Image (spheres, helix red, strand yellow):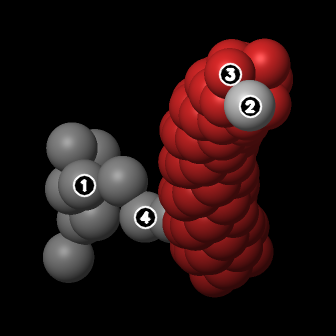
């Protein structure tokens, strides 16, 4: 029997090399995916911190305004006496 020249026979080392490359590629993709998830989570945490900081800033501004009004009312009440 004559071997068919159209059928390419790959040596075993070529298959192992390709298999290793595929495994490494899958690991790289998994690492990239994990890294992206970590970066997204960090961005989400930073956004939440900013939201909380702004909320606290508004709360402090309202408390300061309330304190100024109470102080002004106390001064006005003491001047009437």
Depth check: give the residue in front, 9 or 76: 76
- Circle 3 packing at 10 Å, graded few (<14), some (14-19), many (20+), is few
Q: CA distance from mark 2 to mark 1?
A: 110 Å
> Residue at the spot x=24%, y=55% of the render?
7
The answer to whether the residues at label 1 and label 4 have Cβ atoms under 8 Å apart is yes
Depth check: give the residue in front, 65 or 75: 75
- Circle 2 packing at 10 Å, graded few (<14), some (14-19), many (20+), is few
Q: Earlier in the sequence, mark 4 or mark 3?
A: 4
- In the depicted structure, whether residue 10 falls above or below residue 42: below
Q: Earlier in the sequence, mark 2 or mark 1?
A: 1
Q: Which residue is mark 2?
A: 81
- Residue 9: give its label: 4
- Circle 4 packing at 10 Å, graded few (<14), some (14-19), many (20+), is few
- In the depicted structure, whether residue 35 falls above or below residue 65: below
Q: Would you say 66 lies left or right of 64 here? A: left
> Residue at the spot x=43%, y=64% of the render?
9
Quadrant position of residue 15 = bottom right
The answer to whether the residues at label 3 and label 2 have Cβ atoms under 8 Å apart is yes
Q: CA distance from mark 1 to mark 4?
A: 6 Å
Q: Which residue is mark 3?
A: 80
Q: Which residue is mark 1?
A: 7
Closest to the camera, between mark 4 and mark 3, is: 3
Q: Is residue 54 visible?
A: no
Closest to the camera, between mark 4 and mark 2, is: 2
> Residue at the spot x=21%, y=44% of the render?
6
Q: Earlier in the sequence, mark 1 or mark 3?
A: 1
- Helix, strand or loop status at disc 2: loop
């Amino acid at each position: 029997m004559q071997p068919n020249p159209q059928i390419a026979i790959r040596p075993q080392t070529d298959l192992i090399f390709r298999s290793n490359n595929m495994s490494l590629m899958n690991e790289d993709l998994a690492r990239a995916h994990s890294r992206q998830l970590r970066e997204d989570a960090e961005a989400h945490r930073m956004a939440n911190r900013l939201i909380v900081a702004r909320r606290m800033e508004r709360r402090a501004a309202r408390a300061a305004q309330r304190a100024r009004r109470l102080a002004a009312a106390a001064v006005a009440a003491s001047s009437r006496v």
